[in-house]
Image (cartoon, helix red, strand yellow):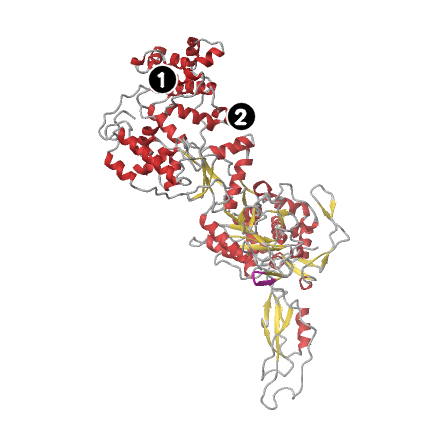
Amino acid sequence: MPAGAEGDPGNRAARGGVPAPPRRRVFTSSTTRAEKARALRGLGALGGLAGVLVALMLLPTACTAGVGARDTARWFDSEPVDMTTSGVPQRSTILAADGSKIATFFYQNRVDVPLDKIAPVARQAVLAIEDSRFYEHGAIDMQGTLRAFASNLSSGQVTQGGSGITQQYVKNLLLTQADNDEERAAAKEVTAARKIRELRYAVAVEEKFSKDEILRRYLNIAYYGDGAYGIEAAARHYFSKRASKLDLAEAALLAGVIRYPYAYDPIRHPGEARQRRDTVLDRMAELGWIDRGKVDEAKSRPIELDVDNVRSGCVTARAAFFCDYVQREILTNRVFGETAKEREKLLKRGGLTIRTTMDPRAQKAAQRAVDQHVPPKNSAHKAAAEAMVEPGTGEIKAMVVDRELGPDKERGKTWINFAADAAHGSSIGMQAGSTFKAFTLAAALDEGMPFGTRLMAPRAFTPVGFRDCRGDRVGDPGASLRNAADGEGGKEFSLVTGTHHSVNTFFLALEKEVGLCDTVKMAERLGMKQANGKPLEQYPAFTLGFNPVSPLRLAAAYAAFGARGRYCEPLAIKEIKDASGHRLKVPGRHCEQVIDEGVADAVNYVLQGVLTKGTARGMGIGRPAAGKTGTVDNFSAAWFAGYTPDLAAAVWVGDPRGGYRYPMDSLCMDGTCYGSVFGATIPAPIWQQSMSGALLGTAATPFQRPPSHYFSKGSGEDRAKVPDVRGMKLREAVARLRAAGFTTNVGAPVESRRYDKGTVAEMSPGPGSAEPGTTITLRVSEGSDEPGDGPGPGDSPTLPPPATVPPRPGGPGEQAPA
């Protein structure tokens, strides 16, 4: 900035009419040694080379080492080869996709700003109290140095240094660049060696940078107390405003803090801080830089703070577990540094701006839904987690846990991110239950099986004839795998109806038909692996979801169905810029077409029915959507994974203390009792609420119709003729309907003039066609009050054995075998 420019602390306007002091010349690398020597002489009236003067000041130390004053001056005049002016810690900020702040990370809370972003009055205040002749002297203030010289000669050691702003900057620079306790101790020790090094560096700094640049660097590196480093962070911390907006009183207060940050801390010691502020104001008036009237007005004002406490890390972040995921990605990925120390230094000192994929609306909707259904401090000690992923990009739009991020010993807190895997949240994962049946379905469709393919679902399934991908036989022939309810076994299902009802033995039979290895490979193609990072284990019960996985991985896999077979690795970081605005390398987007579009369309066709007529019927979101419930063995956990072409999500509900030890088979939570918890009991409503909120106001995208060959055996929702059993005795009617493949239920009796008392008067659904397995509700006639109509008084129907009652939503077929 040229002398006299607006904002220059030395210009006439800024000094209230006082002429600007002479400006020192800025030297470049082409400056001759003679010019440097002339500059080091400083004020000619003082005489003598600055280096010699410093050497004399430090003569007691030099003599002790056997070094002469002239040799000391020549060494001092040479440029230090180990000097670096980089590496000042700056805070990093994590941003959501819309640019809003999620969290900050810092070793020192600092925001580096250019000089023109610092109020001129703030620059004047610091110069007035710290180094009013800064623009008049070189690296060494001769007047201050002479005072120190006299003191040092009399004491025989360095007791005063006459430090100006340049020397203070060097001292702060060495301290902030220290990487360990030994280096920090060396930067603060009170010795002649340290003072020599600081003075030598100061000379080099003055030769390298302009006065304005040195002042800028000093204002950005100085400590202003209470964790605020640099004037921008201090202005935001104490006054909740930018440094460019500081007024006279505020500027003087901050300038006064620099000398003794703790003693003049305005939060802890407001009285001392005010006295120090007034001292700065008086000095500004004494120098003629500020009108006395303005100074007196500023001194009359009490200290008025508007404190903004910025905390480092994810604990207080608005999306704590997503923040934690991003932090771990940076700390563990070699893209950000070869060693863990380098990566941590980059995050906490690099001044990064990290733009992420998080959608605040989706995040808020998911957090609200999870907390509403499974409160953080619920009486049953249960937990819930959800991850949302965008199909076709893999971008993580939301990641929530129904706890606060913090020590597990405090109720309602946990350090474990149940939505992520071990590498990104310390979770070893949870068994996924029947959500894994979607991979068996996809494998069957990938092999060309039509929707109408029907397989027998026995009441119990003995796993024989299974081989893993190594060709080894797996399975225990002595063990039988069963359904969750007897009513689901002993009949045939199609790919469609078997999926809608989530029949365990049907999927075991389908897995055997497709091949265990092909089923496993399908899951792997869709990105599935155990939460600990190991490959999926291969046993016959694979399709029932015994592998422990994370909600994030499951959401990403289901997102591939929504993206018509395009799988993308979960992605949290979109862009990172350093403090200078340069883009850094980040993990790339990895997407691949892992299954044919037509196969994905067929999966979507089947899974849509889960929400309309299957285990999660009634859980739709008012737009095309598909999904799958999952209930884990012995009700130890429950899941729901669902998606649209625009967004996918997976929800887990369970007990962090151990699902088998604390199952959800008779769950009462905060006054609400659920009985046995299935995938449709709690997880599906969480998914429904969060997806509705996340997609609110967005246009619905439809699924594509599957290829016609999948309909070669019909829609899969095969319909059989429903016999007309009206007028039959109840026992005869039940037997007839069961023989036709339907289940029955007996409703309340009805009056009827048409049908005799004790016979079937109504059936719902009525005669016609229906899907096999449909429950037909029968109502028996009570006859009519009119005389001569129907059976005589006292006649009563003979009732059959108790009818089979259809499963409740989310019930039979989901539970994995013990």
Residue at 67% x, 60% y is 484
Q: Is residue 539 above or below residue 230?
A: below
**Residue occupying the far front of the picture:** 154
Determine which of the numbered discs, if any, sits on residue 182 in the image: 2
Q: Is 469 left or right of 241, judged from the image as shown?
A: right
For disc 1, the marked residue is 146
Neighbourhood count class around disc 2 (C-alpha, 10 Å): few under 14, some 14–19, many 20 upward: few
Labels in figure, total: 2
**Residue occupying the far bottom of the picture:** 787
Q: Is residue 602 visible?
A: no
Q: Is 119 left or right of 810, judged from the image as shown?
A: left
Q: Is residue 223 visible?
A: yes
Q: Is residue 673 magenta?
A: yes
The three-letter code of the residue at mark 1 reads: Leu
Give the percent coordinates (x, y) of residue 333. 55, 35
What's the CA distance linking mark 2 and mark 1?
Answer: 32 Å
Which region shows up in magenta? 669-674
The three-letter code of the residue at mark 2 reads: Glu
Quadrant housing residue 92 = top left
Q: Earlier in the sequence, mark 2 or mark 1?
A: 1
Quadrant housing residue 750 = bottom right
Q: Is residue 319 magenta?
A: no
Secondary structure of the residue carrying numbered label 2: helix
Residue at 27% x, 24% y is 3
